[in-house]
Amino acid sequence: MLILSLFTSIFVTLLLVNRKVNIGFSLIAGSFLLVLLNGRGLSTFLQIFIQTLFESTTISLASVIALICVLAHLMEKYLILDRMIIALERMLRSAKATILVAPALMGTLLVSGGALMSCPIVGSLGDRLHISDNRKVAINLVFRHALLFVFPLAPTLLLAAEIGDFKVIDFIKLQFPIALALYIFGYMFYLRNYKESKAEKINIQQYIKAVREFLLYSSPILVSLLGVALLKLSFQASLLVGIVISIVINQYDKKRDGKYNINQHPLITMYKGIKLPMLIAIIGIMLYKNAVNEIDEIIIFLNSLLEKGMPIELLIILSSAVICFPLASTNPGIAILFPLLLPLAPNYETKLLYAMFIYTSSFMFYYISPLHLCQVLTLEYFQVKLKDLYKNYLYLLPLTYIVMLSIYVVGFVFS
């Protein structure tokens, strides 16, 4: 009955998501079935639901995600990010360097399908370097998504740390070589062999101006990060400072150029930046985690599988494929597998290694899914077929996965 309940719960969640139901509502339905089919009753589910809504972890995570969405919305509406990229190209003095960094910087907005925003930049710089369209697609996607392994404000990373109950910085340190590998392999396979013309000469005053503009227009993001890293502020406080800086920049811009006046009060713009579907998704994810934790039999069953000889690594790979590939999302893999498998870790270091294995496996199946929204939009923009894009992944993704496996093995040897 336990296997049937777990399978039914996951199947219903997948089915609802594929029918365009918000992933949060889908996970709420899945957790309801999981609780009910294991004989816990409606009252138990309601108790778990109320506990989830009011627990500090849910409130903290939801507030951080909401503020990230608001900051992203402000930077987009106020044209701050566009000017940051323009200043960056003048600083780097290289089309190849800019085409590598720009999608990652645009990726800091962390909006669903946000890869579309960097397509024009990659397209323009790619034309200058004579890069084929199918390679432009790979460049836009790889250099954007590598950031998800290390960017401290990435919702997926924050979610993993909250559910896994470990420090974000510890997870970032562990996964840094994976992100680095994606960038290095991406450069080797997609950019290394292209020659570029020399950048237009600028004097020292023009270069200093570009640096100043980059620091100014990247300041909402930089301050949000530095507030946490250096001043030990909460994510919420740091993000609020970043939001205030975005508004101040826009107030200054409006006085000197009317094109930056969007004729909307900042509070209204902030309100429109709150993405309710993302908040519902957070509630659904945390609810499913708590539902799994309620059913002790699941952990007992998984332990029995491992005692019978099934490697936990195989269990992670198969589970990630079943959950994340059809859903085209990393979050369900984290929501379902973290509470199932991380309790099996004997210590903190092993828990981090399991978390990295689940995170990377879930990411890989999400990344190559035909339903991956960033991929769909980028393919459409450049008019490239999916099979042509997959050829670009033939070496890059397996090599990156091998880097993760190497970290995993070395971690066990020295733990």
Image (cartoon, rainbow, N blue to C red):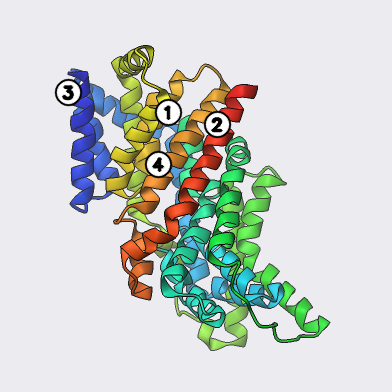
Q: Residue at x 69, y 75 (%)?
A: 213
Q: CA distance from mark 2 to mark 1?
A: 10 Å
Quadrant (top left/top right/bottom left/bottom right) for the N terminus:
top left
Q: Amino acid at mark 2?
A: Tyr
Q: Is residue 341 above or below residue 245?
A: above
Circles 2 and 1, Cβ within 8 Å, touching? The answer is: yes
Q: Is residue 397 above or below residue 312?
A: below
Q: Residue at x 17, y 24 (%)?
A: 4
Foreground residue, 264 or 260?
Answer: 260
Which residue is disc 1 drawn over? Answer: 313
Query: Would residue 397 be found to the left or right of residue 92 on screen?
Result: left
Q: Amino acid at mark 4?
A: Ser
Circles 1 and 3, Cβ within 8 Å, touching? The answer is: no
Foreground residue, 393 or 137?
Answer: 393
> Residue 240: percent from the left, percent from the top?
57, 55
Circles 2 and 4, Cβ within 8 Å, touching? The answer is: no
> Residue 74: percent from the left, percent from the top?
50, 67
Q: Amino acid at mark 3?
A: Leu
Q: Earlier in the sequence, mark 2 or mark 1?
A: 1
Q: Earlier in the sequence, mark 2 or mark 4?
A: 4
> Residue 314: percent from the left, percent from the top?
38, 29
